[in-house]
Amino acid sequence: MIPSKDGSGMRDWWSTLLVAVGLCTVFYGCIPGGGADLGVTALQLEGAAESEMVPTVAPLRDLAWSGGRLIGIAGQEIVSMEPGAKGEVGPYEVWPLPPEVQPRPLIAADDEVVWLIDSARLSLYRLRLEVPLKVERFVLPGELEDAHIVDLEWDPERHLIWIVDRGRHRILGLRPGSVGGEVEIVKEFGGVGRSGLHFNVPLDVALDSEGMLWVLDSLNRRLLRVDAMESRLLEVIGGDSATSRSLLPRPRALCVDAQDRVWVYDDARGGLLMFGTDEPRSEESEPAVPIPSAVAHMVAFRGAIWVGQPLNSRVLKVVPR
């Protein structure tokens, strides 16, 4: 730009430069792994001994813990962070996924491995968070091509991946073989229905300390504790009868903590409901922890419930009383 005689052109040039620098600074500070300066914020939630809000640089589609770090999917990247004890969030690490990997739900298998699944491309991926990212592919059976998979759970005792096929109202246990080989379907149960081991839009699964599987059966308004390997129903919480449907009118997410307490987020009741082994269950009781906005996924770790709210680009850390 050529300065005018009165200097206005030079002022305009400097103004443009300063605006550009400011925008670059803001943008750079919001890129995962690119100087993001984030921390937890104190959040007072009724029914919680302690609660904090961890902002995320992008909406996380799912949550898991691996190697002491919180892992999530953000677009075509895996993002990991380490929420600290003093209110800071440890350095973000970002692992760009190869373009052929279309991420769906995420689970952590152990301290080094996470899994991604893509039923449309009949692929299961094992990821090792190394530099560079190591991606190993397994082939899903053809019958899963039209599956609508909404959740995954790693079973360390049986070395199985439990998946929720919402479209066909069923639960399957998968066992990966050699890299590049076909995944074996070890167990399958379910089908559409309103009772027993039949489901109406299952959404979530979680394992307890005894290796039993908890299933969130959303439109039947109930939770099921299942011996999955024996296809045996052990316990039912809630249900769609006139006397029990108000307990879980619209359950959306599920996790089990280290004390085998079952935590459920119910969208209609607006909070976390807790079901312990010896706790009374009342349909009139208020949620154990009211949550201010919708929850998409939850995971229990380090004595807390980590609640994902992708619409708000944040994770809530809730320590129950």
Image (cartoon, rainbow, N blue to C red):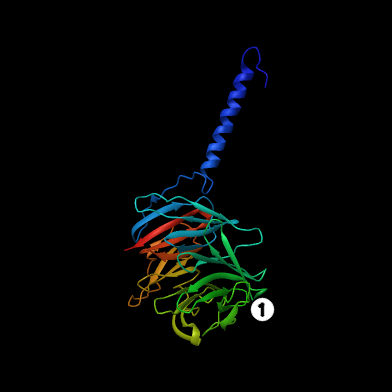
- Residue at 46 percent of width and 59 percent of height: 70
The residue pinned by badge 1 equals 143
Quadrant where the C terminus sits is bottom left
Q: Is mark 1 on a helix, strand or loop?
A: helix
In percent of width and height, residue 266 lies at 47, 67
Q: In this view, does 119 lie to the left or right of 107?
A: right
Comparing 241 with 112, the one in front is 112
The kind of residue on which mark 1 rests is: Glu
In percent of width and height, residue 132 lies at 56, 56
Taking the view exactly as shown, the residue that stands out farthest to the top is 5
Residue 263 occupies quadrant = bottom left
- Residue at 35 percent of width and 77 percent of height: 277
In percent of width and height, residue 192 lies at 59, 81
Q: In this view, does 287 lie to the left or right of 22?
A: left
Comparing 245 with 60, the one in front is 60
Marker count (numbered): 1
In percent of width and height, residue 149 lies at 59, 71
Instruction: Check the image and report above or below for 138 versus 83.
Output: below
Comparing 313 with 274, the one in front is 313
Quadrant where the N terminus sits is top right
Instruction: Check the image and report above or below for 205 versus 290.
Output: below
Instruction: Check the image and report above or below for 207 versus 301.
Output: below
Instruction: Check the image and report above or below for 194 versus 252.
Output: below
Neighbourhood count class around disc 1 (C-alpha, 10 Å): few under 14, some 14–19, many 20 upward? few
- Residue at 49 percent of width and 45 percent of height: 36
